[in-house]
Image: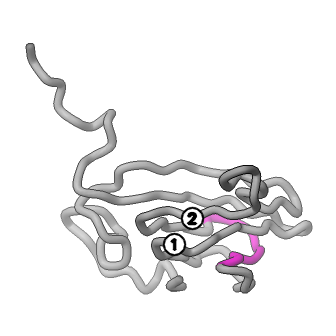
Amino acid sequence: MKKLRLSDLQEKKNGHILQDVLPGAYLSSGGLSFAKRGERSHTNDGPDGRDYHVHGDCEAFVIMQGTGTMEINGEHIAVTTGDIIIVEPGEDHHLHSSEDDPIVTIWCHAGPNRHKNQQHEETV
């Protein structure tokens, strides 16, 4: 896991804003998430209902609002507005939202291809 702040990012004219810390030419999937108070993400969604959540690529979480902790392989790291967390391949990860100031995050993955909505249509 890597933790940095939005202010640590270098200005970009081309490519995606996280290209220095999130491998891949294009942002390829992601979303905006509004966590409930005290919510823990990805609980019991592993194989056979186990409490385990990993990816084969990196995933970025940008904390847009709120506070909480990012659980990485059982260790809890405090996060707050403006933090960027890069989860490495194979790291079991869960985001915990605080009761007092629930978390709003942007999460994303990057890869060699653009999101399917941004790809050119194949002509037949």
Which amino acid, by three-letter code, is at mark 1? Gly
Which residue: 14% across, 23% down? 122
Q: CA distance from mark 1 to mark 2?
A: 5 Å
In this rendering, would 95 be left or right of 102?
left
Residue with the mark numbered 2: 54
Q: How is the image coloured?
A: one colour
Task: Based on the picture, tell me whether residue 65 belongs to the magenta stretch.
Answer: yes
Residue with the mark numbered 1: 90
Label whose residue precedes the other's in the sequence (1 or 2): 2
Q: Position of residue 27 (x, y in %)?
A: 34, 55
Front residue of this view, candidates 18 and 87: 87
Front residue of this view, candidates 47 and 30: 47
In this rendering, would 107 be left or right of 51?
left
- How many neighbours does mark 1 have within 10 angstroms: few (below 14), some (14-19), or many (20 or more)? few
Q: Dots 1 and 2: beta carbons under 8 Å?
A: yes
Front residue of this view, candidates 37 and 42: 42
Q: Position of residue 1 (x, y in %)?
A: 53, 83
- SS at mark 2 in the image: loop
Task: Based on the picture, tell me whether residue 52 belongs to the magenta stretch.
Answer: no
Q: Position of residue 112 (x, y in %)?
A: 23, 56
Which residue: 20% across, 66% down? 13
- SS at mark 1 in the image: loop
> What stretch of residues is rendered in magenta?
64-72
Q: Position of residue 34 (x, y in %)?
A: 71, 51
Front residue of this view, candidates 9 and 46: 46
Kindly indicate the quadrant of the structure image that contains residue 94. bottom right
Q: Indicate whether 26 appears above or below 58.
A: above
Which residue: 53% across, 48% down? 31
Which amino acid, by three-letter code, is at mark 2? Val
Label for residue 2? none
